[in-house]
Amino acid sequence: MTLHLKKGSSRKSAYDLKNPLDEQLETHTLAVLVDNEAGVLARVIGLFSGRGYNIDSLTVAETDSKGHRSRITIVTTGTPAVIEQIKAQLGLIIPVYKVNDLTVDGPSVEREMALLKVAGKGEKRVEAMRLADIFRANVVDTTLESFIFEITGTPEKIDAFTDLMRPLGLVDIARTGVSALSRGL
Amino acid sequence: MSREMTGARIVIEALIEQGVDTVFGYPGGAVLPIYDALFQQNDIKHILVRHEQGATHAAEGYARSTGKPGVVLVTSGPGATNAVTGMTDALMDSIPMIVLTGQVPTFMIGNDAFQEADTVGITRPCTKHNWLVKDTSELAETIHQAFHIATSGRPGPVLVDIPKDVQFASAPYKTKAKAPTSHYNPQVKGDLAAITRAVEAFEQAERPIIYSGGGVINSGVGASQLLRELVAGSDAPITSTLMGLGAYPASGDNWLGMLGMHGTVEANLAMHDCDYMLCVGARFDDRITGRTDAFSPDSFKVHMDIDPSSINKIIHVDVPIIGDIGHILEDFLKVWKARGRKTKSAEIKKWWAQIKGWQATKCLDYRNSDELIKPQHALERLEALTKNMDRYITTEVGQHQMWAAQYLGFNDPHRFMTSGGLGTMGYGLPASIGVQVAHPDALVVNIAGDASFLMNMQEMGTAAQFNLPVKQFILNNERLGMVRQWQQLLHGERYSQSWSQSLPDFVKLAEAFGAKGILVSDPADLDEAIKEMLAHDGPVILDCLVEKHENCFPMIPSGKAHNEMILTDEETADAIDAMGKTRV
Ligand SMILES: Cc1ncc(C[n+]2csc(CCOP(=O)(O)OP(=O)(O)O)c2C)c(N)n1
Ligand SMILES: [Mg+2]
């Protein structure tokens, strides 16, 4: 039995219909409001690892102790389709109340805090202090050979400051990850 | 005043309040208090399985054939881990299921106690939600929540892990009405603007097709009725996924048969060439779409689904409608009728002429034989001999499963229980037990493969103990047939480990369990053997020796499009390219 099928007739495949720009990677900041119950973070992280999504940064803390709510801020990178999937999948987690995509929902403010330990003497020590001043980083600990700077800002600002500190004796860095809120009401 | 009782009794009380009549389970140290409470009551029947995996599949069979959630009770550690496959299966196929597990006492958790396992950790990715209850006062409300979550929205399995001290301790019983309500209340009504857009396009469709899935069945019998009304009123052709069989009757005029990897020519080509696709409660699974970039390239696609994450996950659609299928179809029909029930009937007639041409290929024809029983023939005979019976079918996984979907006709929803998403060998026998428990007077047949049957054959003991007259119809090809077929087509006929060697004597096996065994190998004796199986009032294994190297066609090889089906053995050479080989 032979069948004359019109092979290769897929002139306009669903794949082609997609905007080619769709395939570009985008970084989104998601604010996820959850019930502060045991295992909720594991559910969120398990979703990302189980489905192969990226986590660029993740912060979590209780924001409403009476209502037992926590806010998880996730920075993730993916194609627009993947970002949509991530939001839909997060929405399926039972203790998740709300998923806000701060990147598309309007203007938002993003901040991250970092502590940087910089060791150095002489010229380098002076230069580190001078740069910290420009970046409005605070000195929160000092010894004769080292500083700990505290810096708050966008992740990009922290990246820039970190890059500058590297040649000046950066020993250690601790970053909080991004916290974010939408602007206005 | 709410009554004070032990945690174990609270479990029973909550199950009764939720309308549970049957629990499938297996006892052990960490659930002894609950088994003790079970012993002291008569409202709930307990079906003792022989392996916890059996309990989960039996609960799935019970749930899918009734629309009610299935309930499983197992012990901690190995009891819980044995239930993992069934929970994953239920998650993939959207089956409502409540699994209650015992746990070591709260003060021993984390100590690697005897039979301790991190049950909520292990089952987090294979349940819709799960809980570890640490306080008896929260037990009743957690169980009520569990039922709510398992049964609303897209149904699925949930698990409640109950430490032994929580079972012993006492607390007041909280009724369902008093339990705090969940914020989990998925949208059931579809967006009317979207429905109207879908109807407008439907009216303009010249080559429409309805592609329905398990969501129609999960939505309840009313949804199937509405689907039938839509098909009858519009004359649109309809196909369905494996999970959706029976929502539209196989005997209906507009039925094209199942679609997908082993779907019919007419269903797959109509999907490929349609200009309007109405996806009703299906999820564009890879067994359905084949190559996604060549999937139904010229159609306007409408997707009705209760799960927002199913939208645009695999196939980009023009109109997504999120909600319960029954509600959406009702509104769709209302809008369509209010606008005057318009269709492009002349064009749809032409479309049907094209479809009739594809149907003329008779893709399910096979070469019958006088010497050997062809598996397709065995199923056609079973179909003929059980035509007007109150019949439920379960299957295992493999070629026999696909043949069952192709050669048996399902005219009502809830009549076909099969492991679709996970493809779990060993599903069918315990599922048939669950179905039979729910429908004691109906005919329940498990279409089995020789290899799959062995995976949970211990459940014959359950069938015998509870005198459940389940019929095990083994299409015995002495092969892991589906694996062998892929090896023939994709791996140069190198049949690596796909032989069922040292098979038991199934007749003696049946007898060893106190059931009836029948062997048939001659096509001339087939009808008699089937009749004998049907006539016996008790569990039966019918060992039906069939052609060993029969292939299941049509087949869309992995990585190919709907219009690149292969229909016969002669066409298989070089049909599958390197890209296809890497796919599952
Ligand atoms: C638990 C499990 N293990 C492995 C597989 C892979 N698999 C799919 S079909 C199949 C062979 C099934 O053989 P049989 O039950 O005899 O059915 P047949 O294909 O011969 O009809 C196997 C091994 C599976 N689906 N499930
Ligand atoms: Mg076999």
Image (spheres, coloured by chain):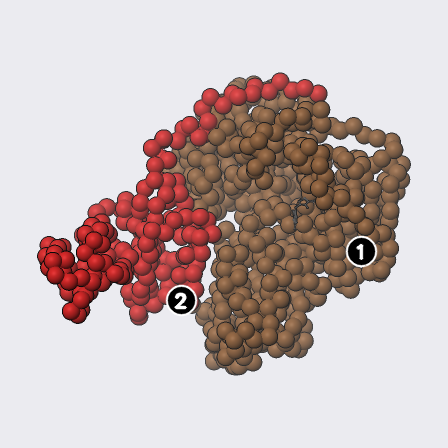
- Classify residue B548 by image quadrant: top right
Q: Is residue B73 visible?
A: no
Q: Residues within 10 Å of mark 2 (few under 14, many from 20)?
A: few
**What residue is drawn where x is 36% and y is 60%?**
A34
- Residue B257, given in percent of the width and then of the height, sits at 64, 33
Confirm whether circles 1 and 2 share one chain. Answer: no
Q: Which residue is mark 1?
A: B539
**What residue is drawn where x is 51% and y is 64%?**
B120
- Chain bearing tag 2 is A
- Residue B264, given in percent of the width and then of the height, sits at 64, 30
Tell whether B363 sits left or right of B68: right
**In the rendered structure, which amino acid carries the disc numbered 1?**
Pro
**In the rendered structure, which amino acid carries the disc numbered 2?**
Glu
- Residue B261, given in percent of the width and then of the height, sits at 61, 34
Q: Give the camera-side residue of B151 and B509.
A: B509
- Which quarter of the figure is the C terminus of chain B placed in? top right
- Chain bearing tag 1 is B
Q: Residues within 10 Å of mark 1 (few under 14, many from 20)?
A: many
Given contact means CB atoms under 8 Å apart, are the residues at marks 1 and 2 in contact? no
Chain letter, brown: B
Chain letter, red: A
Relative vertical location of residue B172 with respect to residue A47 in this rendering, above or below: below
- Secondary structure state at the residue bearing disc 2: loop
Q: Give the camera-side residue of B559 and A86.
A: B559
Q: Give the camera-side residue of A64 and B509.
A: B509
Relative vertical location of residue B553 with respect to residue B66 in this rendering, above or below: above
Tell whether A135 sits left or right of B181: left
Q: CA distance from mark 1 to mark 2?
A: 47 Å
- Classify residue B235 by image quadrant: top right
- Residue B220, given in percent of the width and then of the height, sits at 56, 48
Q: Which residue is mark 2?
A: A37
**What residue is drawn where x is 49% and y is 40%?**
B329
